[in-house]
């Protein structure tokens, strides 16, 4: 019994292999140090190789144990590959969601649920931050813990919420949209997913090591990070897992989009969500290795005592920032472009209109991709970098407003002479996104203007910008996407009334929290401080109260999703009467998506065009025949 | 690497207790594995890019004197010989692939084994160089980036050798055939191996010659 | 597209732009001004606010009008008009924002050059940041202090040093900020800057780069003297720089 549990892929074997992996790493370090005649345990502040190495080998053991590599190991050893019986495909009970599964729909759900878990944990940290900042002075946490809180808050939100949740949503709908039976590399897809909880767990595990959670900010600037306590190594490693996951997913999306589109699905007939993920994936593939590289260098400086950033030994402190931002600026578009895709789908569907200027919309995405590689140093205007680089970077930075503006205006054009359905929460979030993101973008343009940035850099003005674009931008689009595709993913409808409560609470909460941050920033409140001058006390109290409201309404969302998933009224295949392919199959879709690949015959958004079709489904002649395998989907869980 | 689920569509016909997915429509001339490895190579090149960026910052921006800085010296001659060894392994890899294209399984096996041996020799000489070079990664930023770049490359050689070892095992078990789809398992690691070679030429030129 | 009151909408955009700009221009967002750079930056901000108000008004009016006018009645299952685009419109909303941002870029560049113009009589000060305190050296007077003292209307040429990690120098009333980088002075690091205080008084120097536990409290008083004489009097009371000060590790790169 126990033996069988340890042989079969699954949680028991994962636990066992995790322990074996950790033990192996530990023994390796101790053994090598013994051979080299060093102290067995190196416990200077940054070292701890006997913890850092197991923190790599343990998670790898976990991934092997849970079953991500079983097939590949068999294949690599030259054993005959057993014919795939699709046992790891589709979910029959809720338990299947806790196993390695190669079905893109299951993986999509796994992604969304896992990332929202981290959203709530990261949001909980934000609540603690706001509780501390509600009054001047330090009341709840000391400065060390405070620094850890905002660092982990941002790391969780960025690396294991916003970036992967988009990958999750796209994982679910993108193959359906392009008429593919699955992603190009289903097993790689599963591995991508399982690296995520590992990354999140590493970030959180840093709370339990000597010296506490990593506390050099999510940017982890050297040399603060190279000299920080052990927790920082967990940041370095967590970023590697999250980064590997997102690179693998991006490869998968690119190959899927390029090689697996249904017949007739030319580039100019792809829904904009597909275009958006194509662009995002291009960013991920070419930019993410930079953060991987630079976090490795920090880790080497910390554990091996190398001197990449050690100015006393010829290292270059500022090179950290260049390499970091060469990834992390594109990363902000990695966190926004998929949202642009979602908003395009939602607006055209709920406004019953073709997307205005579809081709320019797609080209604008590509324009953003190209430009975003040329602006990284706008985060370094005051960093002491080469001063000649500032003006060119300012110009490219400001020019990004142009393709972004094209998108905003085209959405507005889409609303022109439309039939705007405001009943749907998805649409409300999409429309609010336009307003809020425009404000966040405009504050970004102000930050891009060097003299203004010199004044407001590293103040709450930047914090306000971050949250207007990331919360009012990315997260609003995430909510729009989750509401929009909830019926597709679960086969059930959510409660629109609770949805509206969530929407209005979130909108008011966001503005109440993040608008005043602009003001106190310009007046002189720096960011990343646990304590501040008492003149900012009143606004900070207001901000904290608004933030608590914002936090509370997220619980409404959680309630709505969980209860509707179980008890919501059944949704038909196409409650929004949308045209794209994912809505032409049952909700949730059949286990292999299609019996036969659909044929694409027109654009994706031909609302109002008489007789226009996007796709002809295979079973269309026999439309009366109900889709047979719906019980294999999520609906079965309830 | 991922051919099974694609192939799965093919054998569903005679599978009775379940239904397989429909065959995906192939919307591009390039096959998935090849495109996948090409994109992966872009990623890898960018990872090297991060270390090259660091290299140039350290060399051009942070360092004022000569390069390599005063006491350090690099064994260029040894590295050059090593370069020749690695480059020749690209040719043997090509030979292996051409052989299986022509259906010559013996040639495939020999080609792969030679490539493996050459690659192994490269790694061995590199390790030897590390032992005798006279400085460590802790000695100055120069040492760090020297080991950083060559070590990163060494790790890639190691991965490449692992992939080739897998291909070799399978070659001796007779898994490959002359049809394009029957020797992807050689072609894909081969592309990767050529990438590792080309990358070495860039690393070598930058670190030892420039 | 009949029945859309374009002129009235345009009027609405203009009105909203004016109202938003006026409301946004009333408060002194950046607070007190105490250097020659401050009014220039604030004016640049004002221009940015006006142009942004215009952009924002366009978005709000288009959005508000569409929702008001084309909201679907309950039960209406019909589709909107199948408009696919309008090339002239698309060119316009590419070209106008391009023009706006180029104007902003050009103006920013002018202000930047202006702020960074150096004067010949500048007073050099070496500012050193370390966890978690600031210190100041005056090479001309050969003194050191832990307060920053400068003279009204005389340019200060600040040279930044950091002994451990990054710190950042910010006096909000001066609107200047620059990181102190370990390893500077050294090639490639450009962390020196100039500022000309033009109001006497006492201000606070704030560290704005996360530098560890004491980051929030790493502050130093800044005193701007009315006259050079007043400054000299203060300088005379300060300790001299010890002659054989051991070079900080950071400066002696190997
Ligand atoms: C989703 C994430 C996201 C997005 C989309 C953006 C978008 C932009 N960001 Fe932002 N940014 C962040 C996330 C994001 N940012 C984060 C997290 C940080 C802080 C990192 C840290 O230090 O911790 C940051 C910091 C940051 C800085 C550095 C501040 C500092 O530390 O000193 C700058 C400076 O230039 C900047 C600029 C911009 C610009 C110009 C855009 C543009 O892309 C915005 C373009 C959009 C519009 C302009 C609106 C719509 C356009 C129109 C309606 C057309 C017409 C408009 C005009 C003519 C103005 N950002
Ligand atoms: C997508 C990214 C994202 C998101 C969604 C958020 C969301 C929020 N953030 Fe965050 N934030 C960042 C990204 C993000 N942030 C980044 C990048 C930084 C910079 C960090 C740095 O300087 O390094 C930052 C920094 C930052 C600061 C500045 C810290 C400082 O500089 O000192 C503050 C302060 O108010 C803040 C507040 C908030 C608030 C109130 C929310 C709210 O929107 C959160 C809403 C609340 C919830 C979603 C939680 C609801 C849950 C509960 C009520 C509890 C229930 C609990 C369980 C079920 C476990 N954030
Ligand atoms: Cu010094 Cu913050
Ligand atoms: Cu940026």
Image (cartoon, coloured by chain):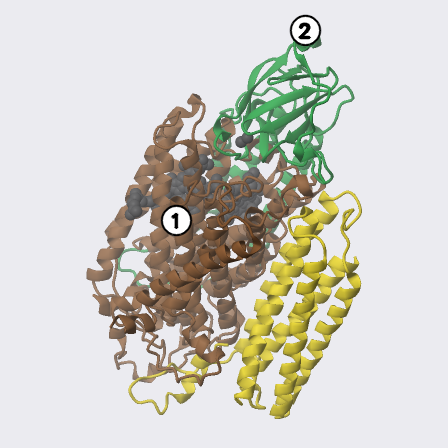
Chain colours: A brown, B yellow, C green
Q: Residues within 10 Å of mark 2 (few under 14, many from 20)?
A: few
Quadrant in the picture for the N terminus of chain A: bottom left
Displayed quadrant of residue A427: bottom left
Q: Is the residue C98 above or below the residue A12 in the image?
A: above
- Numbered disc in front, either 2 or 1: 1
Front position in the image: C214 or C220: C214
Residue C145 position, x and y percent, is: 63, 17
Residue A507 appears in view: no
Residue A272 position, x and y percent, is: 47, 63
Residue beneath label 1, please?
A: A204
Disc 2 is placed on an element classified as: helix
Quadrant in the picture for the C terminus of chain A: bottom left
Q: Is the residue B152 above or below the residue C179 in the image?
A: below
Disc 1 is placed on an element classified as: helix
Residue at point 68%, 60% (across, down): B130
Q: Residues within 10 Å of mark 1 (few under 14, many from 20)?
A: many
Contact (Cβ within 8 Å) of mark 2 with mark 1: no
Label 2 marks which chain's residue? C
- Residue A236 located left or right of residue A547: right
Establish whether ligand 3 lies closer than 8 Å to the Cβ of label 2. Answer: no
Label 1 marks which chain's residue? A
Front position in the image: A399 or A114: A114
Residue beneath label 2, please?
A: C233
Give the spatial CA distance, label 2 vs label 1: 56 Å
Q: What label sits on residue A617 in the rendered view?
A: none
Residue B101 position, x and y percent, is: 62, 89
């Amino acid at each position: 019994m126990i033996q069988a549990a340890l042989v079969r892929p699954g949680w028991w074997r994962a636990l066992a292999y995790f322990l074996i992996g950790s033990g192996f790493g530990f023994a390796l370090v101790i053994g090598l140090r013994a051979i080299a005649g060093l102290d067995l345990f190196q416990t200077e502040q940054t070292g701890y190789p006997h913890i850092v190495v197991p923190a790599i080998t343990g998670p790898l053991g976990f991934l092997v144990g849970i079953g991500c590599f079983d097939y590949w190991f068999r294949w690599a050893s030259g054993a005959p590959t057993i014919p795939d019986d699709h046992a790891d495909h589709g979910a029959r009970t809720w338990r299947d969601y806790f196993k390695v599964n190669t079905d893109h729909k299951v993986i999509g759900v796994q992604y969304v649920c896992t990332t929202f878990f981290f959203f709530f944990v990261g949001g909980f940290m934000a609540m603690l931050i706001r509780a501390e900042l509600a009054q001047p002075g330090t009341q709840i946490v000391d400065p060390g813990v405070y620094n850890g809180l905002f660092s982990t808050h941002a790391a969780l939100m960025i690396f294991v919420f916003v970036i992967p949740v988009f990958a999750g949503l796209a994982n679910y709908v993108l193959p359906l949209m392009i008429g593919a039976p699955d992603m190009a590399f289903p097993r790689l897809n599963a591995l991508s997913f399982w690296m995520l909880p590992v990354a999140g767990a590493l970030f959180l595990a840093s709370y339990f090591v000597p010296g506490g959670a990593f506390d050099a900010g999510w940017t982890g600037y050297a040399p603060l990070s190279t000299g920080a306590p052990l927790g920082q190594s967990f940041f370095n490693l967590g970023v590697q897992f999250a980064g590997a996951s997102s690179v693998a997913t991006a490869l998968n999306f690119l190959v899927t989009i390029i090689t697996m589109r249904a017949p007739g699905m030319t580039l100019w007939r792809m829904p904009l969500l597909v275009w958006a993920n194509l662009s995002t994936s291009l960013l991920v593939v070419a930019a993410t290795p930079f953060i991987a590289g630079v976090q490795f260098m920090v880790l080497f400086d910390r554990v091996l005592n190398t001197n990449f950033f050690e100015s006393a030994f010829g290292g270059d402190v500022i090179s950290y920032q260049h390499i970091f931002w060469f990834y992390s600026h594109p990363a902000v578009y990695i966190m926004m472009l998929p949202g642009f895709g979602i908003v395009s789908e939602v607006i055209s569907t709920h406004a019953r209109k073709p997307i205005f200027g579809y081709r320019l919309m797609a080209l604008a995405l590509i324009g953003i991709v190209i430009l975003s590689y040329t602006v990284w140093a706008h985060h370094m205007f005051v960093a002491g970098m080469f001063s000649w680089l500032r003006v060119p970077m300012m110009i490219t930075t400001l020019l990004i407003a142009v393709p972004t503006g094209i998108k905003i205006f085209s959405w507005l054009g889409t609303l022109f002479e439309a039939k705007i359905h405001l009943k749907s929460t998805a649409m409300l979030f999409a429309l609010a996104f336009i307003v809020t993101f425009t404000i966040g973008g405009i504050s970004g343009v102000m930050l891009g203007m060097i003299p203004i940035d010199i004044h407001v850099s590293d103040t709450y003005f930047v914090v306000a910008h971050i949250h207007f674009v990331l919360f009012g931008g990315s997260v609003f689009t995430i909510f729009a996407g989750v509401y929009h595709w909830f019926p597709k993913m679960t086969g059930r409808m959510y409660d629109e009334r609770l949805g509206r409560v969530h929407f209005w609470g979130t909108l008011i909460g966001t503005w109440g929290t993040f608008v005043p941050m602009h003001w106190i920033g310009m007046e002189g409140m720096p960011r990343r401080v646990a304590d501040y001058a008492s003149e900012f006390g009143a606004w900070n109290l207001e901000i904290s109260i608004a933030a608590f409201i914002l936090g509370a309404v997220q619980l409404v969302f959680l309630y709505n999703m969980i209860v509707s998933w179980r008890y919501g009224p059944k949704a038909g295949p196409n409650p929004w009467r949308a045209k794209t392919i994912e809505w032409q199959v049952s909700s949730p879709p059949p286990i292999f998506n299609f019996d036969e690949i659909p044929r694409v015959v027109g654009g994706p958004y031909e609302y109002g065009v008489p007789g226009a079709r996007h796709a002809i489904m295979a079973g269309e002649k026999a439309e009366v025949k109900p889709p047979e395998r719906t019980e294999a989907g999520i609906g079965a869980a309830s | 690497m991922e051919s099974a689920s694609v192939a799965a569509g093919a054998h569903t016909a005679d599978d009775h207790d379940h239904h397989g997915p429909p065959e995906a429509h192939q919307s591009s001339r390039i096959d998935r594995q090849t495109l996948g490895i090409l994109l992966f190579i872009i990623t890898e090149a960018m990872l090297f890019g991060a270390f090259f960026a660091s290299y140039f910052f350290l060399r051009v921006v942070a360092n004022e004197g000569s390069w390599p800085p005063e006491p350090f010296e690099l064994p260029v001659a040894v590295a050059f010989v090593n370069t020749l060894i690695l480059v020749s392994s690209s040719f043997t890899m090509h030979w292996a692939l051409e052989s299986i294209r022509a259906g010559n399984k013996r040639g495939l096996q020999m080609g792969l084994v030679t490539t493996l041996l050459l690659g192994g020799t490269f790694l061995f000489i590199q390790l030897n160089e590390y032992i005798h070079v006279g400085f460590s990664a802790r000695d100055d930023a120069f040492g760090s980036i020297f080991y950083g770049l060559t070590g990163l490359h060494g790790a890639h050689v190691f991965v490449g050798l692992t992939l080739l070892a897998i291909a070799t095992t399978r070659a001796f078990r007779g898994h490959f055939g002359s049809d394009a789809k029957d020797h992807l398992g050689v072609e894909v690691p081969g592309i990767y191996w050529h990438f590792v070679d080309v990358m070495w030429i860039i690393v070598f030129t930058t670190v030892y010659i420039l | 597209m009949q029945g859309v009151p374009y002129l009235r909408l345009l009027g609405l955009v203009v009105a909203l732009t004016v109202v938003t700009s006026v409301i946004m221009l009333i408060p002194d967002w950046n607070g007190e001004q105490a250097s020659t750079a401050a009014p220039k930056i604030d004016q640049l901000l004002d221009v940015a606010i006006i142009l942004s108000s215009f952009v924002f008004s366009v978005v709000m009016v288009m959005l508000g009008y569409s929702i008001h006018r084309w909201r679907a009645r309950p039960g209406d299952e019909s589709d909107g008009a199948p408009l696919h685009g309008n090339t002239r419109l698309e060119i316009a909303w590419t070209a106008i924002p391009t023009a706006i941002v180029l104007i902003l870029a050009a103006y920013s560049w002018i202000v930047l050059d202006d702020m960074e113009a150096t004067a010949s009589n500048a007073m050099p000060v070496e500012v050193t940041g370390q966890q978690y305190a600031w210190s100041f050296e005056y090479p001309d007077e050969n003194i050191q202090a832990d307060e920053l003292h400068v003279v009204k209307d005389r340019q200060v040429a600040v040279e930044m040093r950091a002994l451990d990690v990054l710190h950042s120098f910010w006096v909000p009333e001066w609107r200047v900020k620059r990181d102190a980088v370990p390893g500077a002075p050294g090639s490639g690091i450009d962390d020196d800057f100039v500022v000309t205080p033009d109001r006497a008084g006492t201000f606070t120097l704030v560290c704005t780069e996360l530098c560890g536990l004491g980051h929030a409290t790493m502050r130093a008083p800044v005193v701007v003297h009315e006259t050079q004489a007043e400054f000299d009097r203060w300088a005379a009371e300060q300790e001299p720089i010890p002659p054989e000060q051991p070079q900080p590790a950071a400066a002696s790169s190997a």
